[in-house]
Amino acid sequence: MQTGQSFTTGCPIAASGVESLARRLDTTDDGVTKMERFESTIFWVTESESQLVLRNEIGDDALRQSDQNNDFYGLVSSPSGSFEGVPRAVRSFGLAHDSFLRLDLVVKVTDTPVMDEGEDSGIKGRRIYRACPGDWMYADLADAWFAAADRSQAASPYLARRQTFAGVVWTSRWLDAEADEQASRFSAAMQPVLIGLNGSASRKAQWGMDRSIEGLKKALSEVRRQARAG
């Protein structure tokens, strides 16, 4: 059975379970789809991506967006990279807590299905995982999907990456608050990401959160230095 592409990450497996799956083999001359059914243990690797988004008070449409930062240093460490861009954005756009423009840090968290618990990559803290093949489907959804007259109205049966969180976890609207208060608000906004992680994933996430909070405080220190310098 063909496997999906391999990828390397420092992020952990957050969940696993045995799933009843299926994959399409062929279609007969009379239009009947042949399916292979099987069970497999699926492991879910959790990762976050972060991005700075500039908006105005008229609407939530993005005026500008930074590049995305990933969890290179481990789970939920991606905000630390995005925070590095805050001082420059504040200076470039003249941002304050009551500005017409605002800067939001948006975090998205996804779970990727993989076939095993991974193997050592040779780089400390990072493992190589094999993503599940793109043609794997949940067996209980596959029959209904293939039989549907309008598949756009049917639930997709494919085993694929799933987004578990998307939201603003820091905003320039908080710039009037002290650094510790902003860090507390950031931590509270990230709680939906952290709740439900298993022991190993939770410990790694705490390390990533510590790194991100350090990045936030460093960025705020630079913002204040810029303000004093005029």
Image: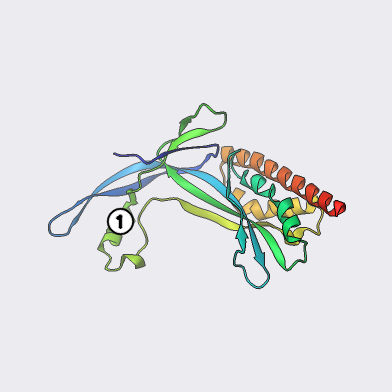
Residue reaching furthest to the bottom: 58
Determine the image quadrant of residue 99: bottom right
Q: Quadrant of residue 145?
A: bottom left
Relative placement, left or right, of 92 versus 117 is: right
Residue 209 image position (x, y, % from top left): 67, 44
Tell me if I can see residue 74 in this picture.
yes
Quarter placement of the C terminus: bottom right
Q: In the displayed structure, does residue 200 sit left or right of residue 133?
A: right
Q: Position of residue 78 (x, y in %)?
A: 61, 45
Residue under the point 51% across and 26% down: 122
| Residue named by callout 1 | 142
Residue 91 picture quarter: bottom right
Q: Nearer the viewer, residue 90 or 14?
A: 90
Above or below, 114 against 159 in this view is: above
Residue 73, above or below 33: above
Residue located at (29% from left, 44% from top): 38
- Horizontally, residue 23 falls left or right of residue 185, namely left
Numbered marks: total: 1
User: In percent of the image, x 80 and y 47: which residue is there?
Assistant: 221
Please identify the residue farthest to the top as the structure is shown: 122
Q: Position of residue 1 (x, y in %)?
A: 29, 39
Amino acid type indicated by mark 1: Ala
Q: Residues within 10 Å of mark 1 (few under 14, many from 20)?
A: many
| Secondary structure at numbered mark 1 | helix
Q: Residue 51: x and y, percent?
A: 61, 53
The answer to whether residue 195 is visible is: no
Residue lying farthest left?
A: 29
